[in-house]
Image: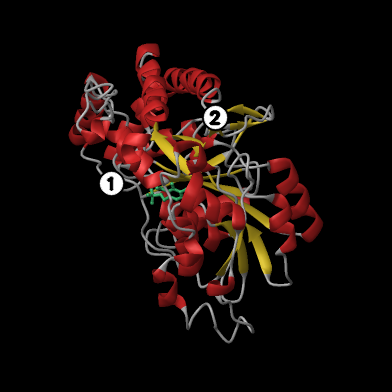
Amino acid sequence: MVNLALKGGKPVRTKPFPKWPIFDERELEALKKVLESGIWGIRGRFQKEFEEKFASYQHAKFGVSVINGSAALEVSLRALEVGCGDEVIIPAYTFMATAISVLYVNAIPIFADIDPERYTIDPKSVESLISDKTKVILPVHISGRPADMDALLSIAKKYDLYILEDACQAWGSEWKGRRVGAIGNIGAFSFQSSKNITSGEGGMIVTNDEDLYLKAWSLHNCGRSPKGPWYKHDLPGGNYRMTEFQAAILLVQLERFDEQTERRMANAQYLDEKLSKIDGIRPLESDERVTRNSYHLYIFRYDSEAFGGISKAEFAEAMQAEGIPVSVGYSKPLYKELYMNYFKKCPLSCPYYGKSVDYSKVKLPVTEKACYNEGLWLPQNVLLGSREDMDDIIVAFEKMQENIDELKE
Ligand SMILES: Cc1ncc(COP(=O)(O)O)c(C=O)c1O
């Protein structure tokens, strides 16, 4: 008799986890208000209200709403005047937009390794990569877990560098009680479909620095200035403006967000406790300086040796068959991506740079282990489930361990 669902056995569950996105009458009402207002696009009241509310939610003075998180990163880099010949230190265990935003402003991503216990950028690796070309450190608060901001701020101060926080997965996450985004100089958020606050697409830049705010504002809005004339363009800005429909939905999404975050955190803590007892599964380590974690993803570390050498992809597939949506997540470090060749001439060997980078020589052991062997994910909507839903997840892990020989046959 077979037990594992992948081999024809009965799955642990067939019931779906809570669906995402979540909406109710309030979103419908908000959309109706926008439709009836006749102001659907530029600089309406919902955009302004959402910018103010979200920036203040993130403990920041200023917010600029934009079309998506990728644009938030790119506009932030332009506001910091990052360009030809500048190096930006980033992790390679992240979504491709982190690297592409740097390349799009003609700067050079320099890849630092991640911390093996947290999967956030490793400050020691960052410091070892600083050169006379480094302009920005770009940590990613991956899965909602803040990077070590104490260490990064002290490195930035020592070498006179900017910090741009990629907080695209980290709405409301806190480092020692301070919400991420504007702990460094400037930060970027995403409201894309899978995100814990969503309007399908959308993004936000936050900062406490008024000059940076005014520059980012101008760059996202065709080079205009907040009180300037319509056809006066002071900076080479593009059109990265959010619509009123997005902002109106996001205002409602924000109302539900605290309660949802509490639920995700409580379920993640429960999973941490239970999964750490399963041989071969290690949740990421908690850090008391992380006082709030948005848990965009629940990332855990998988040791294939404890599961008879079954790869992380095979393990994920078998868990999916059991009704648990485990995914492999990032399975290649960004420096191994073929699209990097597209940038080979400029900016990677641009004359302004004066040197050239060869990503084929980059080898970051912790990142490679996370991508190829170890890092597995559960999506955020799973963490909105009940305690019984979490117990099903644990039962599935135990079932895998007891029946792993079925996968080896
Ligand atoms: C870490 C990270 N950075 C940047 C982005 C880009 O955001 P968007 O998809 O809204 O452009 C994402 C979104 O997936 C992300 O997860």
* Residue pointed to by mark 1: 41
The colour mode here is secondary structure
* Residue pointed to by mark 2: 293
Q: Which quadrant of the rendered structure holds the N terminus?
A: top left
Q: Amino acid at mark 1?
A: Gly
Residue drawn 32% across and 48% down? 42
SS class, disc 2:
loop
Which image quarter: residue 49? Answer: top left
Q: Is residue 208 visible?
A: yes
Q: Is residue 94 visible?
A: no
CB contact under 8 Å: marks 2 and 1 = no
Q: Is residue 336 above or below residue 248?
A: below
Residue at the extreme bottom: 351
Q: Is residue 137 above or below residue 10?
A: below
Q: Which mark is residue 25?
A: none
Q: Is residue 133 left or right of residue 408?
A: right
Label 1: how many Cα within 10 Å (few below 14, some 14–19, many 20+)? some
Residue drawn 44% across and 35% down? 296
Where is residue 201 shown, x and y percent of the image?
32, 45
Callout in the foreground (2, 1): 2
Q: Is the distance from the Cβ of mark 2 to the nearest ligand 1 atom less than 8 Å?
A: no
